[in-house]
Amino acid sequence: MTLPLSLSQAPQRRRGTGGGTHQQWLLPVTALALIFLVNALLSPSFFSLGVVEGHLYGSLVDILHRGAPLALLAIGMSIVIGTGGIDLSVGAIIAICGSLMAVLIQQDVSPLLTTLLTLGAGLLCGLWNGLLVAVLRIQPIVATLILMVAGRGIAQMITGGQIVTFHSEVFGQLGSGYLVMLPMRVILTALVLGLLIALVRRSALGLFIEAVGGNAEASRLAGIDSRGILIGAYLISGLCAAFAGMIIAADISGADANNAGLWMEMDAILAVVIGGASLAGGRFYLGLTLLGTLVIQSLTTSILVSGLPAQYNLLVKALVILVFLLIQSRPVKQRLLGWLQRRRPSPKS
């Protein structure tokens, strides 16, 4: 069978994992290094690591600890963006799953059943988004906007409009527990990332996702089940958001339907873009997405360390991200390369 042109000329290198060119790694790594440098200047003890009660303690550990929910969102978002879609509902899914988990714990449901029902709620939300996009052919930004708007209302219905608190030693470990000196949430995030990288590296799934994102019609003609790939991508995104919701709810031992996961979808999208993915689809890198998450979380930490008033935090963050994305844009890249070439001394004849 002859593949369509858009597929037959696809790069042969493995993508969708940590891959990417040296240039794609250079910008996020440089940004992260600059943020770390600023943090080190503002707080000389920034790189200090210690052991307190058998747990690693320090600013670097705190970045990993606080960035785990965002990393989970960004990992799922990366796969959705790879298909050419977007998922604006992940923040609302966090609220739904966190609220459901809190209510189930309050009602003394077993931890195993609570976990399964909470993750099932995330999968159900992902299935809803996937059906709207893949079957009804609604634009992803509109399809996921529906759940983004309605999701917090669903979460409020689950909690009865109240902030639900609970006490659970099992889920307390998920929110603030440690294993082998590392936060449990960091270990969970690493496991999810490792499983997804293995899934897209050891099978053709990564190629199928990028093929659908690059040209869904050509993929269909090549025999790829584009509907199944799209639904699967949103299922993974919903599942990752459910894990993030569980971590956030367990961290505060409660569920706030109004504020849980609020605007986190925007940070997740930024992390994926910083990781070199194309919002048009056809290209995604899970490893680089994790690096983008570290950039976002490190920037948030540096703003807090700097002592800036809270009202300036979002403005400074937006300006820094804007500068970073401008550097990544093609026109700016071309101008910078042209300037560097003009500054480069000509070779002696």
Image: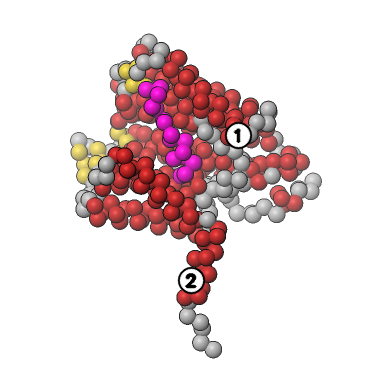
Q: Position of residue 126 (x, y in %)?
A: 55, 28
The residue under label 2 is which amino acid type? Leu
Q: Position of residue 268 (x, y in %)?
A: 46, 39
Picture quadrant of residue 175 = top left
Q: Is residue 187 visible?
A: no
Residue type at mark 1: give it. Answer: Pro
Identify residue for label 2: 340
Cα distance in 3D space between marks 2 and 1: 40 Å
Rendered location of residue 348, percent (x, y)? 51, 87
Which quadrant of the rendered structure holds the C terminus? bottom right
Tell which of 143 and 236 is nearer to you: 143
Q: Is residue 5 left or right of residue 11?
A: right
Residue depicted at x 71% and y 39%: 224
Rendered view: 218 above or below 241: below
Asked which quadrant contains residue 167, the reply is top left
Which residue lies at the image location 51% right of the left edge and 83% below the top edge? 347
- Please report whichever mark, 2 or 1, sits nearer to the chain's N-terminal start: 1
Residue drawn at (42%, 27%) of the image = 245
The local crowd at label 1, few if under 14, some if 14 to 19, many if 20 or more residues have their Cα within 10 Å, is many
Q: Which mark is residue 140?
A: 1
Report the span colored magenta: 256-271
Label 2: state its secondary structure: helix
The kind of secondary structure element at disc 1 is: helix
Q: Residue at x 64, y 54 (%)?
A: 12
Figure colour scheme: secondary structure
Front-lying residue, 210 or 326: 326
* As drawn, 235 above or below 316: above
Is 263 included in the stretch rendered in magenta?
A: yes
Are circles 2 and 1 on residues that touch, CB within 8 Å? Answer: no
